[in-house]
């Protein structure tokens, strides 16, 4: 597994991490597939994908509890990120939400705590003041955002007194390339890591049809890689990008783990960029 710097920090995180949306439930808790999720996540860690991303919103907190079971008994270093929901963006609510997430995760400190979505109800200055206190108190090492526009990233950073935002987690795939217009260039310029979620187009890439997908299949066949692997590798061509595909079963985890050990050449990258433009 290869690694990339997290923002302008001294930390590095894997090219490919482990997403947990749907593990432990979606908007409500669901423990029916916990065993499969735990098995997949543990395999991912064993394959050096030592970056797990979760959120208090996932499974109404149960996803964090599943992650705790995955981490239990491990002595190796795992980079753990979670997210606070906009309904908890008031100062005291941020602090309380972080404490609850840590308790569910079984941790004393998160590596990265992110604002899950922008909020128009709570001033960003109030929220970021709380995030900065969490760093000061040792409850999180780094601050990130998710689904923020360039303007929202600027405002969030300007609201911080001492800390720097290190990342923005956004949707990015061959199918959804909207971040390339402004968000990706801004992250590259400012030294932020772009954490790409839904890098397989929310499941559309594995089953897609049409001329674009014929080119994807042609390149996949030539390289001896799967559609998913080529699509993930395409997203990772930018030095500031890492990705967190959902890790729901062991076969997909094995497939994802192989993505960071090779690179598309420029011709194939450009052919795919044009095909999915």
Image: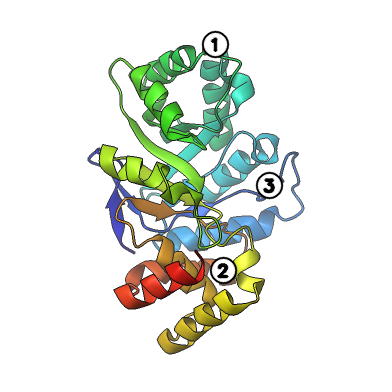
Q: Which of 82/122 is in front?
A: 122
Q: Which residue is at a point 47% across and 51% down the rendered structure image?
A: 196
Rendered view: 99 above or below 91? below
Give neighbour class at mark 2: few <14, some 14-19, many 20+ (Cα, 10 Å): some
Give neighbour class at mark 1: few <14, some 14-19, many 20+ (Cα, 10 Å): few
Look at mark 3 in the image and give the residue it sits on.
Answer: 24
Q: Which residue is at a point 45% across and 69% down the rendered structure image?
A: 274
Q: Position of residue 51 (x, y in %)?
A: 43, 50
Of labels 2 and 3, earlier in sequence is 3
Disc number for residue 252: 2
Of labels 1 and 3, earlier in sequence is 3
Q: Position of residue 23 (x, y in %)?
A: 65, 50
Q: Which of 65/98 is in front?
A: 98
Tell me if residue 72 can be seen: no
Mark 1 and mark 3: span between their CA atoms?
27 Å
Assign a secondary structure to mark 3: loop
Q: Which residue is at a point 45% across and 82% down the rendered structure image?
A: 219
Which quadrant holds residue 35? bottom right
Closer to viewer: mark 1 or mark 3: 1
Question: Taking 184 as reference, is 213 left or right?
Answer: right
Look at mark 1 in the image and give the residue it sits on.
Answer: 92
Mark 2 and mark 3: span between their CA atoms?
17 Å
Which quadrant holds residue 152? top left
Rendered view: 106 above or below 275? above
Q: Position of residue 136 (x, y in %)?
A: 34, 18
Tell me if residue 253 can be seen: yes
Disc number for residue 209: none
């Amino acid at each position: 597994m290869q690694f990339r710097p997290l923002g302008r920090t001294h930390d590095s995180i894997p090219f490919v991490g482990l997403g947990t949306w749907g593990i432990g439930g979606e908007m409500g808790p669901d423990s029916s597939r916990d065993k499969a999720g735990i098995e997949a996540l543990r395999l991912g860690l064993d394959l050096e994908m030592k970056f797990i991303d979760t959120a208090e919103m996932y499974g109404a907190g149960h996803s964090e509890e599943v992650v705790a079971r995955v981490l239990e008994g491990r002595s190796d270093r795992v980079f753990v990120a979670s997210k606070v929901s906009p309904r908890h963006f008031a100062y005291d609510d941020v602090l309380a939400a972080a404490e609850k997430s840590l308790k569910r995760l079984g941790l004393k400190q998160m590596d990265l705590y992110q604002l899950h979505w922008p909020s128009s109800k709570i001033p960003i200055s109030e929220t970021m003041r709380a995030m900065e206190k969490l760093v000061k108190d040792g409850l999180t090492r780094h601050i990130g955002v998710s689904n923020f526009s360039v303007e929202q990233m600027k405002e969030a950073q300007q609201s911080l007194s001492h800390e720097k935002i290190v990342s923005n987690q956004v949707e990015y795939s061959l199918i959804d390339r909207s971040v390339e217009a402004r968000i990706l260039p801004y992250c590259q310029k400012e030294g932020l890591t772009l954490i790409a979620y839904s890098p397989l187009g929310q499941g559309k890439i594995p089953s897609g049809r049409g001329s674009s997908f014929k080119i994807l299949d042609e390149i996949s066949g030539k390289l001896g890689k799967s559609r998913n692997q080529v699509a993930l590798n395409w997203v990772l061509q930018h030095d500031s990008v890492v990705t967190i595909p959902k890790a729901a079963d062991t076969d997909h985890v094995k497939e994802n783990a192989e993505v960071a050990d090779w690179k598309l050449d420029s011709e194939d990258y450009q052919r795919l960029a044009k095909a999915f433009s």
